[in-house]
Every structure is written in C-alpha cells, then in structure tokens.
C-alpha cells in the first residue's frame, strides 16, 4: 500500500471535493449565484474558448445538457473524452506504468487544436457560426 500513497491521496482529495460540491449544491441553486462577465470578452470583444463555460457548467449541474450545449458546445463535447483520459491516467498510475500512455501527448495536442479552432470559428462574422457563441444575458 505504501507505493500507492499518491493515488490514494488524489482519490481522497477528489472525493472530498466532490462531496463538498454536492453539499454546496444541495444548499444553493447554481442558477441563483450572480457571476461576473468574461473579462477577456469585456476587454477585447472576442469570445474566448471558455466564454459561456461557467453558465454551461451551471446548466450541466441542473441536468440540462442541451442548455449547456447552447452556452459552450466545446465543453459539453470534450467532457466525456477528457473524463476517460483522466480515468486512464489514474489506471496507469495505479499499475505503475511510466511513462504514461504514448497517445496522451497526441491527445493533448488534439485537444489544444480543437480549442484554437473553436475560438477562431466562434468569432467568425458569419451567420453559420452564430450557434457557437454563447447567448447574451444571465443563465436562466
């Protein structure tokens, strides 16, 4: 057990954070918290890849996947594969595989490329790219 102390520590911290988040969400509705607007968008007028992700996360916490997709489609699409990558990382850590999976760096570069393409596409001035931009106003 001594050689797996990091894994146990990370697992404990994750479970503690998830329990804390569940406790907070049971007391407070995520849609009633007023959040500030995106600083990058306010400063430049350009939508960053994260614009709308807070409101998308709020919608996901309420169980509204379609509403979350409206605010930030990239976040909703990348969450499942990212979760799989995290599970595989901990699997490799548990089995003491060093270095980790060979494809991990390639997957990271693919994620980075998707984020850059998403940022460029959501700021194009065409009507076909309108669905990539988050709706204005507070999260309902």
Image (tube, rainbow, N blue to C red):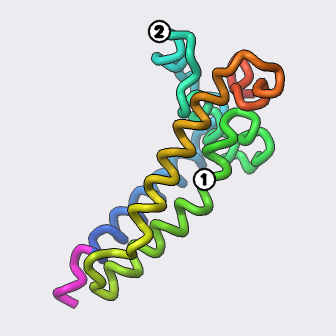
Q: Quadrant of residue 130?
A: top right
Q: Quadrant of residue 34?
A: top right
Q: Position of residue 29 (x, y in %)?
A: 64, 38
Q: Earlier in the sequence, mark 1 or mark 2?
A: 2
Q: Main secondary structure of the magenta part?
A: helix
Q: Within 10 angstroms of label 2, few (less than 14), some, or many (20 or more) residues?
A: few
Q: Residue 4, how many percent across, how many down?
A: 24, 83
Q: Which residue is mark 1?
A: 78
Residue 66 percent location from the top left of the image? 80, 44
Q: Which residues are magenta?
A: 1-6
Residue 138 has which mark? none
Decide: few, some or many residues near mark 1? Use Cα within 10 Å; few <14, some 14-19, many ≥20: few
Q: Is residue 95 magenta?
A: no
Can you identify the residue that label 2 sits on? 43
Q: Position of residue 73 (x, y in %)?
A: 69, 41
Report the side of 18 relative to 123 (left or right): left
The relative height of residue 62 versus residue 49 in the rendered view (above or below) is: below
């Amino acid at each position: 057990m001594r050689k797996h102390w990091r894994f146990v520590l990370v697992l404990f911290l994750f479970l503690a954070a998830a329990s804390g988040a569940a406790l907070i969400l049971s007391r407070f509705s995520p849609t009633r918290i007023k959040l500030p607007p995106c600083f990058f968008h306010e400063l430049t007028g350009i939508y960053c890849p994260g614009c709308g992700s807070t409101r998308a996360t709020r919608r996901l916490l309420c169980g509204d996947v379609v509403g979350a997709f409206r605010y930030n489609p990239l976040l909703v699409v990348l969450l499942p594969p990212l979760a799989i990558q995290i599970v595989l990382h901990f699997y490799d850590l548990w089995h003491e595989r060093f270095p980790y999976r060979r494809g991990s760096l390639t997957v990271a570069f693919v994620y980075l490329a998707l984020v850059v393409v998403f940022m460029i596409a959501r700021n194009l001035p065409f009507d076909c790219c309108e669905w990539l931009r988050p709706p204005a106003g507070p999260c309902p």
